[in-house]
Image (cartoon, helix red, strand yellow):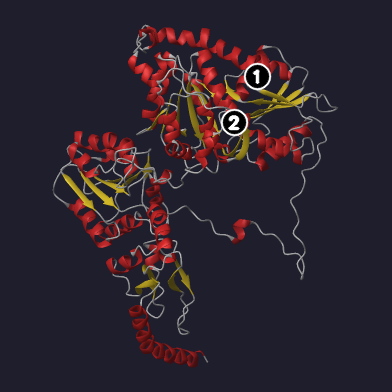
Amino acid sequence: MAERSFVEEVKQLRLGAGEVFRGEGILAVTKALLESGVAYVAGYQGAPISHLMDVLADAQDILAEHGVRFENSASEATAAATLAASVNYPLRGAVTFKSTVGTNVASDALANLASGGVTGGALIVVGEDYGEGSSIMQERGHAFAMKSQIWLLDPRPNLPSIVQAVKQGFELSEASHTPVMLQLRIRACHVHGEFIAADNRTPAFTVADAQNHPQRDVSRIVLPPASFLHEQEKVSLRWPAAVRFIEARGLNEFFGDSGGEGTGDIGIIVQGGSYNTLLRVLQRLGVADVYGNTEVPLYVMNVAYPVIDSEVLRFCAGKRAVLVVEEGQPNFIEQNIASILRQAGHATALHGKDMLPMAGEYTAAELLKGAQAFLAHCGHAAAAPSPAPVPAPAEHGVIPIQPVAASVHARPPGFCTGCPERPIFTAMKLVERELGEHHVSADIGCHLFSILPPFNLGNTTMGYGLGAAGASALNAPAGKRAISVMGDGGFWHNGLTSGIANAVFNRSDNLTIVVDNSYTSATGGQDILSSQARNPTRSTGHAIEAAVRGVGVNWVRTLRRTYDLAGMRDTLKAALTTQERGPKVLIAQSECMLNKQRREKPLLRRAVASGERVVRERFGVDSDTCTGDHSCIRLSGCPSLSIKANPDPLRTDPVATVLDSCVGCGLCGEVSHAAVLCPSFYRARIVSNPTWWDRLRQTLRQAVIGPLQRRRARALAQLSF
């Protein structure tokens, strides 16, 4: 159950030639695949291209109509290996995953694919969420493309350019017998726009044709001596073919080389993905408009690799200075262009990282400073950037604008309200009180938020599904066992073999906690092998415990309700203190609360609207009982737990309170019980469409409790005076 359904949007995928397609970038990519005659598509979800997998899943009937095979791969390595179908057959195939982490996982398959080359077009759509919006290490897929000589497209972030890049990517791949990467920034994935559609194409050669007419070419297999020849092919055949195609088709673009006074002898070279931001900056500096008309000539590299020498030399001819806008470090493009200019004997001054930040996302603010510095350095008197709008004066004078940090506290990421993973780490903190601290090897996923307050658990994280492997070095006789954590998505992605099976093989004595919330929740709630939801196109319901026992783990415990805090605490303690040797696995199960709410809320709304009696549970705090200790908050961190003023005039400490965002998971009450904190939590039942019996009971309760409440209020009012 993905976090978003594209059932309605995918209807646009049936649009024909001449019709206008309007929608999101991710949906446009799918339409472009169909228009390109793709034969098979595979991939692994991960921001910012998670929704591409969701679109494809919702469009399977349309894909089937055109004989397109779609597979939601078990990992990025699986997806990349799928492109093997294009090695010997004229099949156009596309795969997608998150970069750079996904590219790292897929690197073995991609390197082999790039070495042997392809017959059919092979397109790798990578989501590059670089910068502050990223959740991964700050690297780029550019280095991998250069290392394996995979051509890298970085189109301008608008729908026509993205659609054209998909189609040209297949053609470039076939012309040069080389796989092609299409890089999409997070903004490009979710940009909205329109383009003129073309007819969808059924592949001329289908997957079924390949199965019925198998072909083999031993020269495409990466084994000596063929592998030595592959390197020579890349340089002497594939690279020149790619350069010829890029030049002939005009994949890169030139704008604004008008030769206007003071501007014709300078220029800017920019990656396609940064074009929109740069244009906005030039507009603010008064040398461009929103329609793309610019006084400063631009060379837009929609192909980030390879760099086309002839185009660079043509653009730089007659220019005394050029600025290279290349996001990220190392500055591969800038170094390449510098080499091209120097070898050709050009005297054009090259600027880049000397005027722009060495690392980090090139936001509009950073580009504005760099572009202004470049224009000033070149003697071009650009207008000062247009100021931000000034707020209208208030009645009693202008209110000074304070920096956000001065009035808003930093808010680290954390678990959602009611998240079933929160009680796992609450239980770990309770056990820590008794047994002391343990080394905790963390993993990629929602559970990684446990490294932050209020839990402060987790020493390292090495990659998706590598939590158990990250603790493998700490498998030595000692007084304490190391703890590792992984999610169910990471377990099926990589953890079963690299973590659990490795622990069995090496006779580990550590504890691995598998957080089983039924989905790959961190990427949008997609189904996996162990999901309990019925999926019409995939096989689900396969128990993690069976897989763990299948590779040889004997000490396995499954807790089917993580909100049972006492049970979680006791099981953790038992795993860490048992005399039994060997790897230990604790499977903590409860459905992701976000997915549960997505499923149940519409049902509840319909039930209430139809007049049915609906009961919802909510928790609260008795202000009179609460002592203001706030241990509940320190051991939970739930966003629905907050504080408010103490109603008792004799006490100044604020008391805990439960906000309306509470989903009734019950953890706060469990914490106060398991941790022996306080009895101030209560559970309330909210009844919609109550029956006559519900109303009668409420009337009786109010008749008894109401007078007592009013008497107490009067007593407190007297004390306040």
Q: Is residue 147 left or right of residue 683?
A: right
The residues bearing labels 2 and 1 have C-alpha atoms spaced at a distance of 21 Å
Q: Is residue 75 left or right of residue 325?
A: left
Residue under label 2, please give it.
197
Q: Quadrant of residue 608?
A: bottom left
Residue 201 in the image: x percent, y percent?
51, 24
Residue 340 in the image: x percent, y percent?
64, 16
Residue under label 1, please give it.
250
Instruction: Find the residue positioned furthest to the left.
Output: 580
Residue 411 in the image: x percent, y percent?
51, 56
Q: Is residue 451 above or below residue 219?
A: below
Q: Are marks 2 and 1 in contact (CB under 8 Å)?
A: no
Q: Is residue 227 left or right of residue 254?
A: left
Can I make out residue 326 in this image?
A: no
Viewer-side residue, 173 vs 112: 173
Q: Secondary structure at mark 2?
A: loop
**Local crowd size for mark 1, using a 10 Å CA cut-off: few (<14), some (14–19), many (≥20):** few
Q: Secondary structure at mark 1?
A: loop
Q: Which mark is residue 437?
A: none
Q: Quadrant of residue 243?
A: top right
Instruction: Find the residue positioned furthest to the right.
Output: 261
Q: Is residue 680 above or below residue 459?
A: below
Q: Residue at x 19, y 54 (%)?
A: 574
